């Protein structure tokens, strides 16, 4: 029931248009909906953005890493990270580049971030990069 | 007579020796410093380049705004770099290209389509393009102390008509003379004689360059002679092209506040907002005409005089056959075509931050005159939204204008500072409150207390009951501290998450005392606070001195699930030859148990759903998940809000410089700037899954006991595995079969 209710609320609020206008009164004094936050999992559908731009950047990053140009690889990953901060693939490449630079700690920390967004085989790849 | 001759000879010999010595000295001056002078360049600071790709969340208007800032011209049909055209829902942009440190981006004609606030198609030369990277805006320079700004250009980048026109006006014999021109001097002398005062210089370009480089502006005979000698020496040492190029980069063309504008390239940018190779004839002529008196012919102040001077230059250019008479007529019919006036250091507060980060890495003389190119993550579009939100809110709260504000915005994924507000008047230089205000943080520090508690799962969880009754803490020095709740009420036994969501001081103070001040201070340090904090009990309620930037550092660590990443205002630094000197890379460093941070994030989301921060949903859509915390200090001297979405973190502050009361709370002041900004700027809600080792349980939210769904006061909360309450209410879980039960088990990760 809870799920259905939540779904309903979300659907309804999605129809509401834009934020309300600013009024000088204390907003906290107004009774806005006291809706408990959904705990934990908010697994939204993957962003329709996850665009060819990210794929292109990651492909370049992988190629440069393979050629040993870690600076070039990092630069591409950084750009990908700005475009898609919730894409596990980006964290995987960041972790691998750190690992290639001999920075196991940083690789592990980046992989850990990726685990928050991963699915499928990506998760196991990220777990492989965790510090044991 | 015979006695005088040897004396005369001696005097002459001595004079000649002296002259030779002087020439040697002057020669040394020139050869030692010509190259250095030629290339002394302030650092240029760039904003982030706007990256456009299919799926990018940006509107046509924002792109047009960016193109406008970059000096692109809107035309009917884009044919050359720096032009764009708009059709309904689409743009055709002819980009200029840019030598980025990672890879050069070439100029290209691209077509962009937009729908629903996103880029829906991107094509160039008939095929799909992955990314179009526009060139970055220059947001300011970092100058040597004398304030000279310049942009270096090579001679072959300067339009030929500009060079020829300059020579026609300033020095027709440039390619023939040896540094000085007797006929020029004669002409000037005649003019001076006629008028009875010094009205004309008759200086060659070489002489003018010598004067600018080495000499003081006074008009004495000895200085004039020195100038002549040095001009000849310069001509002997260097080719004409080097002298001309240096001149074109050095010539003084006006003033912009404390900054003096040198060289045609910088002047082109300043007056016309265009690169020098895109200047029209009318604009070239205006700049050439200004050399004689940059202040006298300042086109902004003395419009008509500047115009007449420009037209005179055009006539001379035609007479000297630099251009034909038809071109001159067309150019004379053009308006002055100045860009709209705006200060060049448009974002002084952000530049302060860049300067500070530079100072940690370089000596000033190395970064201020070495011609570095500094690439920052600064986002002008976000900055404008932040300024607009602050202005809107402050004008509503305090139209008279003595309230102050400050804000810091970061992109959480890589800890880049993307916008920064140093005060209510964003263009003002001076006291930068985002960096330099030192204020108590109030409840903004509470998350550090709760995080320290949640990191001890054997003692604390979100459902742990805390005592919210009044308390008195006696210090070792005999001082007495009696914190009270903001609403002057006590709430009895409350669960830990509610105490944070409602920002109850008494419960928090008790929790802080149980943990110990050193534990809380240590948590702040681990979260990235580098400054020392007062080791007193009131620390747990925000005592101390903090800037918005420091708070951004702490909340940044919370936003990226407990990893510490230094805030960055510099992406990379390139030297004048395009060589990459430094490139910053995102480095996460685990600082706090991610499971504990996950629980804290839950409570911070509760703050905005049910607690003191729920005013944010007057601005944000209900389904847009964010987390945040309010902060208020005594009598509302400081109103704080810190919080984050899936992409951005912002810390906002409102208060008065003289520390007087504002009557505002965190939620009635700073929250509104925050929420107004996030509603427009944040594109991603929080969305991530629970980390391993966290699980959900139903608990009785009054008694802190395990219970079941549907029981009284039941609430589903996340717990670190094994830290859930031991005792249960006895209310039986209603076992549900069928489809619904399966869905629920799926949600909890039980179904497979």
Image (cartoon, rainbow, N blue to C red):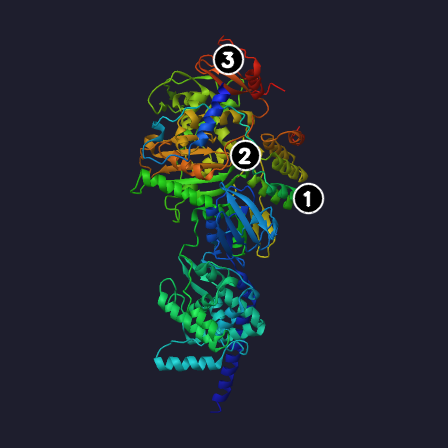
Q: Residue furthest left?
A: B400
Name above or below for residue B282 compared with residue B147: below
> Residue B564 — which label?
2
> Helix, strand or loop at disc 2?
strand
Q: CA distance from mark 1 to mark 2?
A: 29 Å
Chain letter, disc 3 residue:
B
Name the residue rendered at 45%, 16% in the picture.
B701
> Helix, strand or loop at disc 3?
loop
Name the residue rendered at 43%, 51% in the picture.
B346
Residue of label 1: A63
Name the residue rendered at 35%, 36% in the picture.
A22
Closer to the camera, B426 or B658? B426
Q: Position of residue B280 (x, y in %)?
A: 48, 65
Q: Position of residue B737 (x, y in %)?
A: 56, 12
Q: Are marks 3 and 2 on the same chain?
A: yes
Chain letter, disc 2 residue:
B
**Which mark is in front, 3 or 1?**
3
Q: Residue furthest front?
A: B88
Label 3 Cα crowd, 10 Å radius (few <14 / some 14-19 / many 20+): many
> Helix, strand or loop at disc 1?
helix
Name the residue rendered at 52%, 58% in the picture.
B41
Q: Position of residue B332 (x, y in %)?
A: 42, 70
Residue of label 3: B708
Asked if marks 1 and 2 touch (Cβ < 8 Å), the reply is: no
Label 2 Cα crowd, 10 Å radius (few <14 / some 14-19 / many 20+): many
Q: CA distance from mark 3 to mark 1?
A: 53 Å
Closer to the camera, B611 or B405? B611
């Amino acid at each position: 029931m809870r799920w259905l209710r939540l779904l309903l609320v979300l659907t309804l609020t999605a129809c509401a248009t834009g934020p309300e206008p600013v009024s000088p009164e204390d907003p906290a004094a107004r009774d806005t909906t006291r809706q408990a936050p959904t705990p934990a999992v908010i697994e939204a559908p993957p962003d329709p953005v996850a665009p060819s731009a990210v794929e292109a950047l990651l492909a370049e990053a992988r190629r440069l890493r393979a050629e040993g140009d870690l600076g070039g690889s990092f630069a591409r990953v950084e750009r990908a990270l700005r475009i898609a901060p919730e894409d596990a693939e980006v964290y995987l490449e960041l972790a691998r580049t750190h690992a290639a630079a001999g920075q196991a700690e940083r690789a592990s920390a980046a992989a850990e971030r990726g685990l928050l967004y991963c699915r499928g085989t990506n998760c196991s790849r990220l777990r492989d990069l965790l510090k044991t | 007579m015979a006695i005088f001759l040897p004396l005369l000879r001696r005097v002459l010999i001595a004079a000649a020796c002296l002259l030779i010595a002087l020439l040697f000295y002057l020669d040394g001056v020139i050869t030692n410093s010509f190259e250095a002078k030629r290339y002394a360049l302030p650092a240029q600071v760039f904003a982030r380049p706007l990256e456009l790709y299919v799926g990018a969340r940006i509107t046509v208007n924002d792109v047009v705004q960016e193109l406008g800032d970059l000096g692109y011209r809107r035309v009917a049909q884009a044919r050359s770099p720096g032009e764009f055209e708009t059709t309904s829902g689409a743009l055709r942009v002819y980009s200029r290209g840019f030598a980025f440190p990672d890879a050069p981006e070439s100029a290209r004609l691209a077509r962009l389509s937009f729908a629903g606030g996103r880029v829906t198609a991107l094509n160039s030369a008939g095929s799909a393009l992955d990314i179009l990277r526009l060139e970055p805006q220059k947001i300011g320079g970092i100058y040597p102390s004398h304030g000279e700004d310049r942009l270096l250009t090579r001679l072959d980048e300067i339009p030929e008509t500009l060079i020829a026109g300059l020579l026609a006006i300033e020095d027709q014999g440039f390619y023939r003379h040896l540094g000085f021109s007797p006929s020029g001097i004669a002409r000037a002398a005649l003019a001076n004689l006629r008028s009875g005062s010094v009205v004309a210089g008759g200086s060659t370009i070489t002489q003018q360059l010598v004067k600018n480089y080495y000499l003081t502006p006074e008009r004495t005979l000895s200085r004039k002679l020195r100038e002549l000698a040095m001009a000849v020496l310069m001509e002997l040492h260097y080719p004409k092209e080097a002298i001309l190029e240096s001149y074109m980069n050095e010539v003084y063309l006006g003033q912009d506040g404390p900054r003096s504008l040198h060289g045609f390239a910088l002047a082109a940018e300043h007056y016309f907002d265009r690169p020098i190779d895109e200047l029209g004839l009318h604009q070239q002529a205006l700049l050439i005409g200004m050399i004689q008196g940059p202040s006298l012919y300042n086109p902004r102040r003395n419009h008509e005089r500047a115009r007449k001077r420009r037209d005179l230059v055009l006539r001379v250019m035609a007479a000297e056959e630099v251009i034909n008479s038809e071109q001159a007529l067309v150019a004379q019919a053009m308006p002055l075509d100045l860009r709209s006036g705006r200060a060049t250091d448009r974002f002084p507060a952000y530049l302060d931050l860049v300067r500070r980060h530079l100072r940690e890495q370089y000596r000033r003389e190395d970064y201020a005159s070495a011609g570095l190119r500094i690439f920052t993550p600064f986002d002008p579009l976000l900055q404008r939204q932040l300024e607009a939100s602050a202005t809107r809110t402050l004008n509503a709260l305090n139209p008279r204008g003595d309230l102050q504000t400050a804000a810091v915005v970061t992109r959480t994924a890589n800890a880049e500072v993307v916008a920064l507000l140093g005060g209510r008047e964003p263009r003002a230089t001076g006291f930068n409150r985002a960096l330099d205000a030192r204020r108590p943080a109030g409840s903004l520090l509470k998350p550090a207390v709760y995080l320290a508690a949640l990191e001890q799962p054997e003692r604390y969880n979100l459902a742990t009951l805390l005592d919210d009754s009044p308390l008195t803490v006696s210090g070792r020095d005999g001082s007495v501290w009696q914190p009270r709740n903001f609403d002057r009420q006590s709430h009895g036994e409350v669960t830990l998450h509610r105490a944070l969501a409602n920002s109850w001081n008494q419960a928090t103070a008790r929790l802080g005392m149980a943990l110990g001040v050193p534990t809380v201070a240590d948590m702040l340090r681990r979260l990235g606070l580098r400054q020392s904090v007062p080791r007193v009990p009131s620390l747990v309620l925000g005592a101390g001195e903090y800037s918005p930037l420091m708070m951004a550092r702490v909340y940044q660590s919370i936003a990226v699930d407990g990893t510490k990443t230094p805030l960055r205002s510099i992406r990379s630094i390139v030297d004048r030859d395009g060589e990459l000197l430094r490139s910053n890379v995102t480095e996460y460093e685990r600082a706090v148990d991610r499971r504990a941070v996950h629980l804290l994030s839950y409570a911070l989301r509760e703050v905005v759903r049910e607690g003191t921060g729920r005013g944010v949903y007057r601005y944000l859509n209900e389904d847009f998940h964010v987390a945040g915390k309010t902060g208020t200090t005594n009598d509302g001297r400081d109103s704080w809000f810190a919080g984050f979405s899936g992409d951005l973190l912002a810390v906002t502050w409102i208060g008065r410089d003289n520390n007087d009361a504002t009557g505002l709370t965190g939620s009635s002041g700073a929250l509104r700037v925050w929420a107004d900004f996030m509603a427009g700027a944040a594109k991603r809600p929080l969305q991530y899954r629970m980390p391993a080792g966290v699980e959900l349980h139903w608990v009785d939210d009054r008694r802190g006991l395990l219970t079941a769904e549907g029981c009284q006061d039941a609430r589903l909360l996340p717990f670190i595995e094994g830290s859930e309450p031991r005792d249960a209410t006895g209310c039986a879980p209603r076992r549900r079969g069928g489809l619904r039960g399966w869905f629920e088990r799926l949600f909890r990760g039980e179904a497979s």
